[in-house]
Amino acid sequence: MLRFRVWIPLFLIVMAVPWSSEGTPRSQWAEEAREARTPASAPLPTAARAALPETTSPSGQDFGAEARLLYRVVTCARDTPLPANLDAKLVEKHCQWLLPRMEAYRRQYLARAKPFFAKVLPPGLPRTVVYPFGGGDLLSALTTYPDALEITTLSLELAGDPRRINTMDSKRLRASLAFFRHTIIGLLAQNDSTSESLQATQRGDLPGQLNFFLVGLAVHRYEPVSLRYFRIEPDGSLRYLAQEEIQGLEAKTARRRHGKWTPPDFSEAFANSELTFRPRGGANAPLRIHRHIAANLADNFLRHDRSVLKYLEREGRVTAMTKAASYCLWNPAFSRMRKYLLANMEFMISDSTGIPPAIAKKAGFIQKTYGSFKGSFLDTSEEYNEQFRALWTEQPHRRLAFRYGYLDSGKTFHLLVTRRAPRRSR
């Protein structure tokens, strides 16, 4: 399939930590003391805040109006009128392309995935979800964990500036919507985005990652309520940016999170977003939260700045997922992120880019396979390939009717459940 030619493991390009012949890092990082997860002075970062009244929302400039306008234009919420400055014919042409593809995702993909996950997910899971290397993929997070109250996605990509829609003329609108269709098609058709498409979302008049989030909401029939941007303090708490802080950062173009990554053309203020949402028409429904954090998750970055890990640790026990993640969790250069997951997650759904079997078993997890696995989609550690092949071989074949992340080297579907082993009673 020619489409796969564009999958590039860009997360790995600048990571200089070598692999040993055994697939382990040549030097192990020292264990750092864990701090208390919920200091009394911390703002509520957990899913509990989703059930609070809107009046208790955090401080900071709210771009909810812009989020709702983008939602109307980009995801075609036709029950909301368009402002006069936006060409209704251009938007309608866009909708004629997008709406059938969103419906196809519901009919062809979600109809298969939803009953599968309903059977696979055990009761009592944490309703806080962490999705590393997740790009703009709120769509898959809501597909995988439909009951999640709080979802955090982490990737190199920045959320984006929502304000340009307010002054967009017809020429820019036409070009922007065409570009958006070009970048979103992989997510809707293959349930994944290519590295090149994710890079492309960092430039242009429409905030690419934010619009991906809004499409995820629309497919699952949610609507945005508020949108705020934040930075993560050294202790892991969140500081929501006020209007004057955003204005102060206007001249500071967002920094690269990766040496080979396309630099964004918007302010650093719009890196990390918090989007609250609820079912469409459910004015009295409790709010849910999606946070996106733009960060390089490699060890050499997390060692220098531990704020992201401290934020994640403050989230407490979590449910996790990852897919199409360039096998970063196989790579010793991402050992800190992997160690965080093993210490804090109860349950994880992934493709083969999840936790390698020997590492998972040593940390007290058991794994269950679905579909088939012959080898990794990208050329990577043969040791871990052998472990995964053995894992799939020793378990009975369990049918998987939909693609989840990468195909394997034989172009077949596969999925992995990793869950904490039950504690033995004494």
Image (cartoon, rainbow, N blue to C red):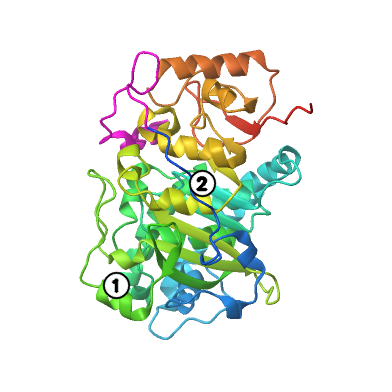
User: On the image, which quarter does residue 208 sit in?
Assistant: bottom left
Q: Give the range drawn in magenta.
A: 1-29
Q: Which residue lies furthest to the right in this view?
A: 426
Of tags 2 and 1, the one toward the viewer is 2
Residue displayed at 61% across by 55% down:
103
Residue displayed at 35% across by 61% down:
271
User: On the image, which quarter does residue 272 sit in?
Assistant: bottom left
Q: What element carries label 2?
A: strand
* C-alpha distance separating marks 2 and 1: 36 Å
Residue type for callout 1: Lys
Say if 152 sits above or below 44 in the image. above
Asked whether residue 169 is in view, the answer is no
Q: Is mark 1 on a helix, strand or loop?
A: helix
Q: In this view, does 26 lie to the left or right of 139?
A: left
Say if 404 sits above or below 199 in the image. above
Foreground residue, 306 or 57? 306
In the rendering, at what x and y percent does residue 186 appear? 45, 46
Question: Is residue 3 one of those drawn in magenta?
Answer: yes
**Which residue is identified by label 1?**
171
Question: Is residue 55 one of those drawn in magenta?
Answer: no
**Which residue is identified by label 2?**
131
In the rendering, at what x and y percent does residue 42 appear? 51, 65
Foreground residue, 93 or 329? 329
Q: Are marks 2 and 1 in contact (CB under 8 Å)?
A: no
Foreground residue, 14 or 124? 124
